[in-house]
Image (cartoon, rainbow, N blue to C red):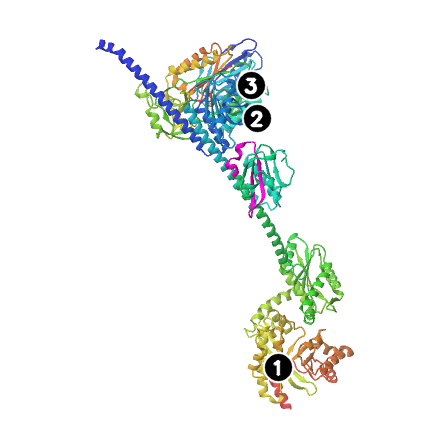
Amino acid sequence: MVAYGDRQAPRFESEAESLRAALSRAEGAAAAAYRDTARLIRLLTVIGTPSSPGRLIDRTLTVLSEVFAADVVCIAEAIDDRLFVTATSGLPEDDPAFTTGWALGPTARRVINSGSAAARHGVPAEDLPPPLQDERGTSAAWIPLSGVGSEFAGDLLVLYRRGGDLFTPADLQVLLSMAYRMYSAVEARERGAAIERLAQAGPGLARHLDVGSLLEDAVLLLRELTGTDSTWILSVRDDLAEVAAAADVGEDTGKRWPIPAGELPGWPRLAAGEAYVGPGGANGDDPMLLVPVMRDGGVIAVLAAKGRRARSFGKSAVEVAQVLAAYLSVAISNGELYRRLKAREQELHRRASRDPLTGLANRMTAAQRIDETLASTPTGVVGLLFFDLDKFKAVNDRLGHEAGDELIQQVAQRLRKVVRPGDMLARFGGDEFVLLINGASDLTDLNDMGRRIQAALADEFPLRGERVEVTASIGAVLGRRGTATASAMLRDADAAMYAAKARGTGRLEVFDDEASHRSIDRLDLRSDLSEALEHGQLSVVYQPMVELKTNTIRSFEALARWRHPERGNVPPDEFIPLAEETGAIVAIGAWVLDQACRQLATWQREFPEAHLTMSVNISAVQLERGHGDLLDVIRSAGVDPADIWLEVTEHMDTAEDISTQVSALRDAGVHFALDDFGMSYSSLAYLQRFPVEGLKIDRAFVAAMNDDADNGRGIVRAITAVADSLSMKAFAEGIETQAQLDGLLDLGCGYGQGHLLSPPLTVERSTAALRAQRDRG
Amino acid sequence: MGVRALSSNSAISGVGTGNGTDSRLAAETAIEEAFRPLAGREPDLVLVYASVRYDLETVLKAVTAAAGPSAVVAGATTSGQLEGGRLIEPGDGIAVLALAGGGYRFGLGHATGLQADATRAGRALARAALGAAGPVRSPHEAVLLFSDGLAGDQQELLNGIHKVTGFQIPVVGGAAADDRRLAETFVFAGDRVLRDAAVAVWIGSDRPLRVAGGHGWQPTSLPLMLSGVEGQIVKELGGRPAREVFWENFRPRGGVDTKLYKKAGGYHSEHAFGLIQPDGSLLIRGAFIDSDGNLRTFSPMPPYSAVQVVSCEPDDLLEIGEEVVERVARGGEQEPSVVLVFDCVARLDILGERGHEEARRLQRAAHGAPTFGYYTYGEFARTTGVAGYHNATIAALAL
């Protein structure tokens, strides 16, 4: 066995040897196959891994160096006779290949021209770059990157391997495929990156509202996106092209601008909205990219880029530039629209903040300004004057609204001269003005300013051939910064103005605590008044109107009374103006008229011999349309309209024409009497316009009869004379002394009322008085 | 220990070691021994290898103080050292090399942030070292590299360096180690102790600088594709669970008992990966099973690489070591003054007691020049192409 074994051993050993060798070969083949597969997969993986274009190239070249054992792998572009390296693995970063390039060797040239890859072993010196000149037995592979026939081919992938093996045809196949894939990936990523950059920057362009700065930004973006050295944006207007923005490295555009747009390279394509890529004409042989910016079918601008690197104007560069052009078109339109919108807004704002008649600040702006001024500094005071024009309504009535407007304009013009810088004059509406005095420090300043206003108005105003005198009633208030508000100051100044008005014309009243209370009272009363009628707090009293000669009651004046649950009786001269302001007067007035008419009917039934009539005060708004028919009220009470006197005041000024209602009342027999006659300068004119049959002599004149015998008496005499001459009845108001009564009798005044004769009486007491009179008679 | 005084344009170098618990004392002992042959001459280059057990700041303070202002001082922490034929076991020891003359120009650079971007760090590192070497370039140049062996992608670090050096400048060096603790390693630049960093010495010379590397490992598997890699974890090999395939290809050595998982210094060192190179050679990448049961490498493996499971015999390792040292020691026109050796700690693990034999045999192969080296967590030997990071390999440079 041993011998056998010994004999057999060499054969087994040699078999084993050959098997081992075969196994080794098989392992070697498997290793090679795996290595080749692995390098393909590694390359594909690198190319497929998301990264920036630069990083992608870098990684791919590194892996190429690893998997092909190449000492130098580079991407280079041929320009003229030089080969410039743009990316590498294996060359140091300061290698001149990046800046001055290498001489273009014959093999590289052939590869570029033919578009086919090439490999050499033992590369001859003319095909070796300087760093490898001393190496013997170097292998190299040249792979064209751009397809042949493309407009600007010239990029190469080159691998050099010192010693080692030849790059096999299979290697070249892998390299070609990888180069193509890498290049596609780089292009796609460059494009993706450019689009992304554009997507980031594009909306930013829209923020430019000025075309100049928009184009300055856009031209830089264009240069970045196209990767070129020089870009311009040309504006095109009236068929002339002009450089509107440029981003170039000190290069002359080589043209004298402007030039006719038709002379731009590829103009027919641009005019059709298409991009042009091709020779730059007068700019030399460098390729140019021109992309039109279109609007409404016309070219408004042209994006221009000049390339050194042919590849820069590939499909993606053109697409990106076209997207930028579209952005620009929108941005330019936006800019213009925005400017127009802004102008419109400013106009609207001006209109909204200004009073159209005078150009002064309006109510809203005034309130804002006051609040702003109060907030501008933490301490100190702000002055505010609130004023209206005395007797302005009369001017309006007499000369018409247009004349009134004209007067307001003239007044505004004069007031402007009074206003100091920092102050603010506003028209609040109607004849109301507000003056904010920023620099006021105390009440003296307010008084001073009030005087200046009065002085400014002192000269008569020429109006429709007349000369009109105007004074202002002024309310003044000081507001403390930090605590005061615009609304509070306006309320207080308004209250002060009413106080001033109550004291006469052309007065200034400074708001104080008392006024403050009044002001607040007014507000409370306003709201209480709206419910007074509903809550039965109102009543009517009747003041007898006496035939003076016979001391016989001929008539009653119905007077409204308000008994406030907390304040007690509120005087009519306090609540009637409030009712007029709030509009409550319509309901109250109708109620009073109804009460008075029904009472008259009762009395006429009981005292037919007295031939009683009834006077009722009415407010202008009651005569306006839509506020019910007073005649209906009178008739439904069952009295003859001819027994009713409606007392109107000279201040009756309404926006509406009341003549229809007045005529209807008059035609039905209702009489009108003018209350407070003589208190207004327009009295006589009023008489012409209103069918008045009675004049009431104001209590002020009656009272004055005693103070200054001549003057007071003279006025009363004049009034009775007017009444006589116009066949009107004269009624004296406010007779309080025997002397006044005697004086009136002397002047032949027929009728009168007053405390001397009888105060206003309740229904019961009035009835009692009538009974007493009947019994007496 | 070794002393060489060569011709007038030859370098003078001295090596020395120190040990014991006292950092300052150990450093001073090593310095004193290393500087003695220079006979008062100021060194141009001082390399320091130290166990992580020492107070490294103290060590470097002592070294830089002795080295003087013009010397370049660099180094790393180690898992044992090789000095003049002696093995200094992991866990102890400071080794110092002082070198003067020889017409060398040295430039020191360092960079941090390996973990975040190793390529960027590599580029910055090479630029810094090149800049420090001065404006005049030398006919022959090389980069001596020390890196934090537990930070970042070491091949990426090399890629970054390669961007600056180009293909003509070899890179040699080692990743720092920490006595097999795999916790924290450091590199030295001047008196600075750095983590997540790398240190480079740009070497300019009038004579060619010889770098060599070799491993002696043999494949135990057919070629496999790394079909699943996540960072440093290998998930799949040829489409199957990586750990399973890895184990399947272990080769018995000394019987079935030792086939699986003989732990040496914390991880199994007898099997690794060989990255199949274009020329059919293998780049060794150490692999181990971590505490989570993952098959882990020291540096990320390139996905879809072709690999083979490799193993080795101590005799092969000893032979390749000699070969590598001989290649650099004998290749030049002039006798070297020192042979720098970067030897993987995995090799020491496999050699076990025969580590001392390796130290002696390496010294013998150096033909009289002292050998000076340390046990690393990775070796750099880039000569062709960009690939140059290895594991379980021995790399050498003669100066």
Magenta segment range? A290-318
Amino acid identity at mark 2: Thr
Circle 2 or circle 3, nearest the eye? 2
| Residue B190 in view of the camera | no
Q: Quadrant of residue A97?
A: top right
**Whether marks 2 and 1 lie on the same chain:** yes
Disc 3 target residue: B106
Chain letter for the residue marked with disc 3 in the picture: B
Secondary structure under badge 3? Answer: strand
Left or right placement of residue A386 versus residue A183 in this view: right
| Residue A146 in view of the camera | yes
| Residue A632 drawn at (x, y percent) | 56, 79
Secondary structure under badge 1? Answer: helix
Q: Residues within 10 Å of mark 3 (few under 14, many from 20)?
A: many
Indicate which disc, 2 or 1, sits on the residue closer to the N terminus: 2
**Whether marks 2 and 3 lie on the same chain:** no
Disc 1 target residue: A667
Q: Quadrant of residue B249?
A: top left
Q: Is residue A309 magenta?
A: yes
Q: Is residue A250 magenta?
A: no
Disc 2 target residue: A99
- Furthest residue in direction right, as rendered: A710
Q: Residues within 10 Å of mark 2 (few under 14, many from 20)?
A: few
